[in-house]
Image (cartoon, rainbow, N blue to C red):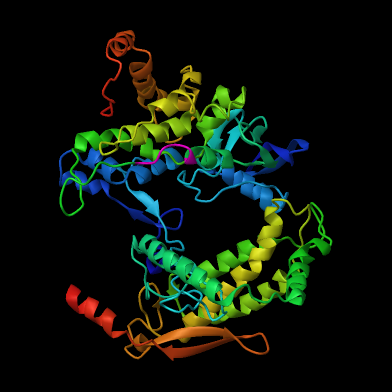
Amino acid sequence: MNTATFSIFRGDSNGGKFEDYTTEVSEGMVVLDAVHGIQSAQANDLACRWNCKAGKCGSCSAEINGMPKLMCMTRLNSLPLDKPVTIEPIKAFPHVRDLVTDVSWNFAAKMKIKKFKPRPPDAPDGSWRMAQGDIDRVQEYRKCIECFLCQDVCHVLREHNKHDEFIGPRLLVYTAALEMHPLDTEDRLQDLKNAHGIGYCNITKCCTKVCPEDITITDNAIIPLKERVVDEFYDPLKRLLRLLRPKPKPENDHV
Amino acid sequence: MREIKEGRGSPHGGVFLDIAWIKEKIADAAAHIQRKLPSMYHQFKQLADIDITQEPMEVGPTTHYAMGGIRVDADTQMSNVPGLFAAGECAAGINGANRLGGNSLSDIIVFGKRAGEFAAKYVKEHGAGQVNNDQIDEAVRRSLEPFERGATKGGGAEGPYQVQAELQEMMQDLVGIVRTEDEMQRALDGLGKLWERTRKVAVYGHREYNPGWHTAIDLHNLMTVSEAITRSAIERKESRGAHFREDYENKDAAFGKVNTVVSKAADGSMQVRREPIPVMPEHLKQVIEEMK
């Protein structure tokens, strides 16, 4: 049987270093299998978070040879095994131990996004009518598994630590799903512009590149939201009209 | 499983599942499969280079769901420990002998809500209970014990992962999909030996986010559940739902009227007994009648 070496970051918030582990590898294995093999035989106290092993729970996010990836969906045959494979924790959030980071900021930030607010039911039985075409668009955003790899790779969070001013690609995708839902009546544009800091995104598309669910984050979620914000707040013609008509009708229909 | 045991399995010890045949029945079959099974399509493609719209996939059975669990009151979800509530997969009850797809989600939503409501009501009525400090000290001592057994990286006493892996393998082999009395008795012997090892597993490192330590603690629960499953499966000499006995291939009406109840005897051993299934209340019978 073949072996491969994995250089895994060991340590906690006080610091740490890479340690090399050599383990047996076989056909069909993914990085998480190797980490589990190392954990059970050589490093029982190696901390890593995982659950479904099928790319659906979003728990095992890590940086493999410098690229943000899900450990359970990264096959060993996609990596060069003639040199050590480096595995380290994601960087945009506080480090806990080894491969584990505290991603709870994402859930706190999500709570600040205005909730789904549907229009009154269309039928007396309390149900709604939607066209399939209108609902298809939001399906892409709902593929998100909240692995936060897009947050990890976003330089606004990772390099500039703007966690207080910018919600990051994952939560812009979440906002897009709400904003473009055919039944939703809430207006989140003011929040997007100010509290959620959509202007910080300068569309480098790193988030799209690392998304394990292949969501076209920048083109399909962030840019349409940016366009709506621009339409609402920066359109010179609208500004002029507003000057002429001091009390414009609130515009709610963004669909 | 019997096909595989008799040597007719696929190369990796499973069977082939082919859904690509549908292309002979409908036009645009590949798109249909991708739309209906998007995750499965994506996983097979990414993890095995297999296009399930074109070729068969290799599949094998694994653990799906634990139909048994902590015995709770059907209305309040309270266990026989006053003030301890359980809901969802850890609680025994609504799924009978086989949970069907989608029922787990409705189970946790309905009975999780009920458990929460009744727990809140219980606390309001009873206040905070008396805490027995001796019991807490004992629990702390027991959970920290694995650190004191002299394990070091790459040596010393046995760690928890080897025992867990062997338990997993033995339960899959001997108390898995197809069960026989003989194999399950062998599993009980094996469990006895694994209990000895479980009580001796050792861990190293510190207490913060230490998966080895967590596994050493979990191991006691895995062992308890495995033993309860094995003893109950031996007791139920029939086949029903997900419980298939090769030595008792059919349903037995008498077993249909009883639950298998496992409890701890005074000497700490597991006691298995049969209890009549509770009589369905009149209002629930009516609901079922209305559905017919």
- Compared with residue A75, is residue B273 higher up or lower down, i.e. above or below? below
Residue A186 x, y percent position in the rendering: 33, 35
Q: In which quadrant of the rendered image does the N terminus of chain A lie?
A: top right
> In the picture provided, is B84 more to the left or to the right than A100?
left
Q: Look at 29% across and 51% down and name the residue there.
A: B18
Residue A166 x, y percent position in the rendering: 52, 27
Which of the pair B180/A222 is nearer the observer? A222
Q: Look at 49% across and 50% down and name the residue there.
A: A52
- Compared with residue A166, is residue B25 higher up or lower down, i.e. above or below? below
Verify whether residue A248 appears in magenta: no
Where are the magenta residues, as a range?
A: A111-116
Q: Look at 50% across and 23% down and name the residue there.
A: A206
- Compared with residue B112, is residue B125 higher up or lower down, i.e. above or below? below
Asked whether residue A214 is in view, the answer is no
> In the picture provided, is B169 more to the left or to the right than A224?
right
Q: In which quadrant of the rendered image does the C terminus of chain A lie?
A: top left
Q: Quadrant of residue A247?
A: top left
